[in-house]
Image (cartoon, helix red, strand yellow):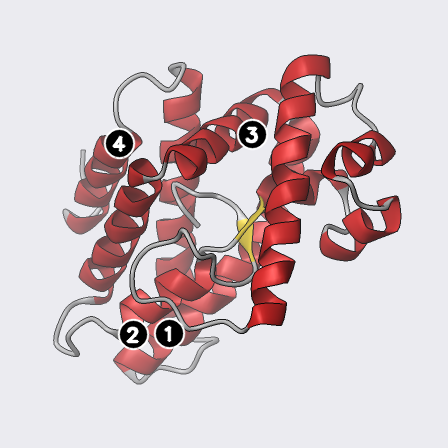
Amino acid sequence: MTGMPARTTAATTSAPPGPPKTGLRERKKIQTRQAIRRAAYRLFEEQGYDATPVDRIAEAADVSPSTVFRYFPTKEDIVLTDEYDPLIEAAIRARPAGESPLQAIRHAIVEALRAVYEDPQERADLSARTRLLRDVPAVRARSMESMSLTSRMLARVIAERTDRPADDLELRIFTGAVLGAFQEATMHWAEHDQRGDLLDVVERTLDVLERGLTL
């Protein structure tokens, strides 16, 4: 998720503290995903998104095109897939039971973003992803589809905290508002050439939500 408006898979070794432990096989999968993603970001920067075919990304990552598609069904998914949803879910579950859902999400997201900012490579990935979200219509369109996975994750974990069914209308409105707010925060940061700290933008966004969407 993130001010990380990405579709997510599994925990990464350079992610926020406290993730579920992963086995060797899963760590190798994560390393392959990261190699493909970072090769793609490099080529997109050098050649442009539309001018970079998947087979060129595969060559740069030293994998086959079929391997790229096994990890990323579309080229847009290379941009949008990261490893943060399981970490955020675990962080929300670890929050005190009496804490409000929005406060629990706030602590989880801020923790994740701080970890990104502490890792130069993760920060560079976030910067590249955000530029592509701003500049490439196909990536923006795909992000709306992929965000539904994060929405389901949030609905599931918040339903457990509030004893509501996962398809509860108010719960769906809540999770939709939170994710929409993060999407807008990320785009605001991107449209202002990533000036300032994304963490500050996210904190201001959460302030708006906490005061009840009043202006």
Question: Which residue occupies 38% across, 41% down?
Answer: 3
Can you identify the residue that label 3 sits on? Answer: 133
Tell me, for residue 59, which label it has, or none.
none
Pinpoint residue 46: horizontal percent, then vertical percent: 67, 14
Task: Tell me where residue 96 sits by quadrant.
Answer: bottom left
Q: Which of the pair 158/37 is nearer the observer? A: 37
Question: Which residue occupies 67% across, 33% down?
Answer: 39
Q: CA distance from mark 3 to mark 1?
A: 27 Å
Q: Which comes before the other along the chain, label 2 or label 3?
A: 2
Q: Which comes before the other along the chain, label 4 or label 1?
A: 1
Question: Which residue occupies 41% across, 72% down?
Answer: 20
User: Dot 3, how many residues are within 10 Å of its Cα: few (below 14), some (14-19), or many (20+)?
Assistant: many
Contact flag, marks 2 and 4 (Cβ < 8 Å): no
Total count of labels: 4
Check the image and report above or below for 46 versus 116: above
Residue type marked 4: Val
- SS of the residue at dot 3? helix
Q: Which comes before the other along the chain, label 3 or label 4?
A: 3
Contact flag, marks 3 and 4 (Cβ < 8 Å): no
Image quarter in which the C terminus is found: top left
- SS of the residue at dot 1? helix
User: Dot 1, how many residues are within 10 Å of its Cα: few (below 14), some (14-19), or many (20+)?
Assistant: some
Can you identify the residue that label 4 sits on? Answer: 201
Can you identify the residue that label 1 sits on? Answer: 157
Q: Which comes before the other along the chain, label 1 or label 2?
A: 2
Pinpoint residue 6: horizontal percent, then vertical percent: 52, 46
Q: Which comes before the other along the chain, label 3 or label 1?
A: 3
Q: CA distance from mark 2 to mark 3?
A: 29 Å
Q: Which comes before the other along the chain, label 2 or label 4?
A: 2
